[in-house]
Amino acid sequence: MFHDEGLGAYLAKYIELNYKPHPKLTIVEGGTLGFTLMTYYQEYDKVIIVGTGSKEGKVGAISSENAQEIISNENTTKKTANEVEITMMIEICSFHENMGEVQLITMTPKDIIEVKNGMTSEALAKMPDLVDTTLRELENLGIVLERNGVDVGFDEVIEGFANPRVSHSF
């Protein structure tokens, strides 16, 4: 991972580990799915994408844009691969009748250049704000997540990505 670039994956895993499943919610870590994500835009009524952004601002600044806002900002320089890919996918899917509403929640990272597992301390300190923003967006859709009684912190989540374990069920 490119240091803070993994924050969307970390957030998805954090919610998956700390909250009860909800029948109206599918969590997908899409950082490596690329254009395969387009099928979600067409199959779901609402898609929320959480990741790094390149808007000017302090580390940890959070912004939220819908598909129309993303497309209308096409002259804005996209500095992350995710931003470029997401914008292209939204533009392509917008020509189809069956496109759900897309909301992009981004957080300004400190470092997405260095290849390193983990996050900068500045971005990591803002992850609870990103969780809150994401949970509020879900609540706006009528999806209220309940804690599951487990308390897995971001340090453990990041460690799991850095040192994955293969489990076998026989």
Image (cartoon, helix red, strand yellow):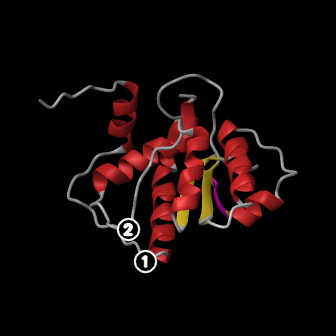
Occupied quadrant, residue 145: bottom left
Query: Would you name the residue on which mark 1 appears?
Result: 142
How far across and down, in percent of the image, does residue 151 sit? 25, 51
How far across and down, in percent of the image, does residue 115 sit? 57, 22
Q: Can residue 50 be seen in this snapshot? A: no
Judged from the image, the secondary structure of the residue bearing numbered disc 2 is loop
Q: Which mark is residue 107?
A: none
Task: Say which amino acid is labelled 2.
Answer: Lys
Question: Against 103, is 85 above or below?
Answer: above
Q: Nearer the viewer, residue 159 or 61?
A: 159
Q: Residues within 10 Å of mark 2 (few under 14, many from 20)?
A: few
In the image, what residue occupies the spot 73% across and 52% down? 92
Q: Main secondary structure of the magenta part?
A: strand
Q: Which residues are magenta?
A: 61-65
Query: Would you name the residue on which mark 2 appears?
Result: 24
In the image, what residue occupies the spot 27% across and 62% down? 147
Query: In screen coordinates, is 32 left or right of 148?
Result: right
Task: Say which amino acid is labelled 1.
Answer: Gly
Q: Nearer the viewer, residue 58 or 80?
A: 80
Labelled pair 1, 2 in contact (Cβ < 8 Å): yes
Judged from the image, the secondary structure of the residue bearing numbered disc 1 is loop
Residue lying farthest to the left in this orientation: 170
Q: Can residue 19 be seen in this snapshot? A: yes
In the image, what residue occupies the spot 59% across and 66% down? 100
Q: Nearer the viewer, residue 97 or 17?
A: 97
How far across and down, in percent of the image, does residue 57 sit? 72, 50
